[in-house]
Image: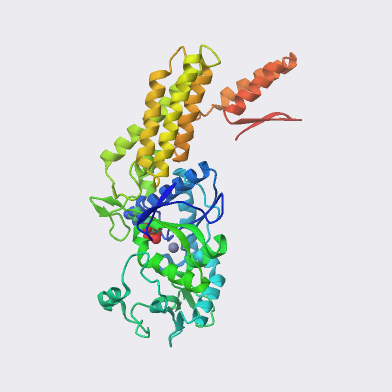
Amino acid sequence: MKIYNTLSKRKEEFVPLEEGKVKMYVCGPTVYNLIHIGNARPMIVFDTVRRYMEHRGYQVNFVSNFTDVDDKIIKKAIEEKVDASVISERYIAECKKDMQAMNVKPATTHPKATEEICGMLDMIGTLIEKGHAYMAQDGTVYYRTRSFKGYGKLSHKNIDELQGGNRSLLVTGEDQKEDPLDFVLWKPKKEGEPYWESPWCKGRPGWHIECSVMSKKYLGEEIDIHAGGEDLIFPHHENEIAQSEAANGKPFAKYWMHNAFLNIDNRKMSKSAGNFFTVRDISEKYDLQVLRFFMLSAHYRSPLNFSSELMEAAQNGYERIVTSVANLNYLMENAASDTMSEEERKLAKEAEEYIAKFDEAMDDDFNTADAIAAIFELVKFANTNAGDASGREFLQALKEEIVMLSDICGLIVEKKQEMLDDDIEALIEERQAARKEKNFQRADEIRKELLDKGIILEDTREGVKWKRA
Ligand code: AMP
Ligand code: ZN
């Protein structure tokens, strides 16, 4: 499995730190508003990376944070005259709803910055002790950027050029910095802002320190993959490396992965530019599976331009897979025989080629565009070779392959038909009648039929009760 590493600017063979395990950290959103579909790109992309790793047998510890203390959150809280936590908790809940609707798995841990202040105080203390940070007169703690020899290695920037080009970094209120390149680890509170006690001043953390601390706490000092959108390479990830490696004395992350932007009219979609659609906006017009399909139809390192034409194409593509699976299900119900014929056995073997093609594409730095092309080839193969005369076992094998590959992409392609309450009640009555006649085989069949459709029966003293799974 090859991964493009921003650190080396090359595709490298993936070798985990610990056999069979992957420790992965993805920078999550700042929660002050509904997420837009630009924010959704890293969520979908790295969820797919995780799913593929799991498919390949790795146990993935996946950590993704919520930044819940930030200027924009505080501004909104002041506008609404509520506590900052009311804003962040509201948008964390909304973000989780969107993630679920896009079939993005919950992380193993979703830490929040405000719950990790202790760890931040510890790491800042260590950095001061080691000479990598200092306190200015007003209690602000700065990272001494030039003290870290590797600074610039991720963004491939030369520290001296940075200094030359960034004189303006020395902004008002930061004139106590030793060097314009130094960045904030801890800053004094302002009137009306949330704050925490610290050895330096009552205040709150700078943005970068939270990820170094959470990554260490939940994954350890060295991790396999650190990921996020490409706008995070500099300064956020560069600063994270400086903090973690200086504090721990160890390399931080082995592989750095960054997704390219989701654009609109060839400009980055962003809250500040106002050129965005929220995931919620899109859900009013499309099934969010279509959004997921659209995101994966391009390689994650290629810019992707959002347009209604491309969304229509994604809808057609997604529906082609859904229709093929529905057709296979229909044929299975009416199959001529249970087992595969000799001819079908050969065809089933042939179909496995498409799984190999899919894996090959994903092994090449998660080329989801080619992986989806392999699913389409399999769909075409199934549509050509499955017919009225096919054996159920053959149809089932084809269906399971399509569903499995789609599931690795997080695409739900088998629509479970919801049973109507009346139909459920009718089957339960038939089951009761069968039991009265001691036809337990039929009674069991009905229980299983309902279970397959997600209906669970419970025999209680008051009679049969049912619920949806
Ligand atoms: P933010 O809430 O701005 O910190 O962003 C959360 C995540 O979304 C980060 O990984 C960003 O890099 C990513 N992101 C924001 N805008 C876009 C975009 N237009 N395209 C791709 N990724 C984005
Ligand atoms: Zn981060």
Residue 243 visible to an observer of this rendering: yes
Q: Residue 231 at x, y = what percent?
A: 34, 60
Residue drawn where x is 54% and y is 47% of the image? 58
Q: Nearer the viewer, residue 422 or 292?
A: 292
Q: Residue 438 at x, y = what percent?
A: 75, 15
Q: Is residue 315 left or right of residue 25?
A: left
Outermost residue toward the bottom?
Answer: 137
Residue 423 versus residue 466 in the image, above or below: above
Q: Is residue 35 left or right of residue 468?
A: left
Residue 415 visible to an observer of this rendering: no
Residue drawn where x is 43% and y is 66% of the image? 77
Q: Residue 387 at x, y = what percent?
A: 43, 15
Residue drawn where x is 54% and y is 43% of the image? 57
Res 353 → quadrant? top left
Q: Quadrant of ligand 2?
A: bottom left
Res 318 → quadrant? top left
Residue drawn where x is 46% and y is 80% of the image? 133
Q: Residue 415 at x, y = what percent?
A: 47, 30
Q: Nearer the viewer, residue 154 or 322?
A: 154
Residue 354 versus residue 32 in the image, above or below: above
Residue 61 versus residue 439 in the image, above or below: below
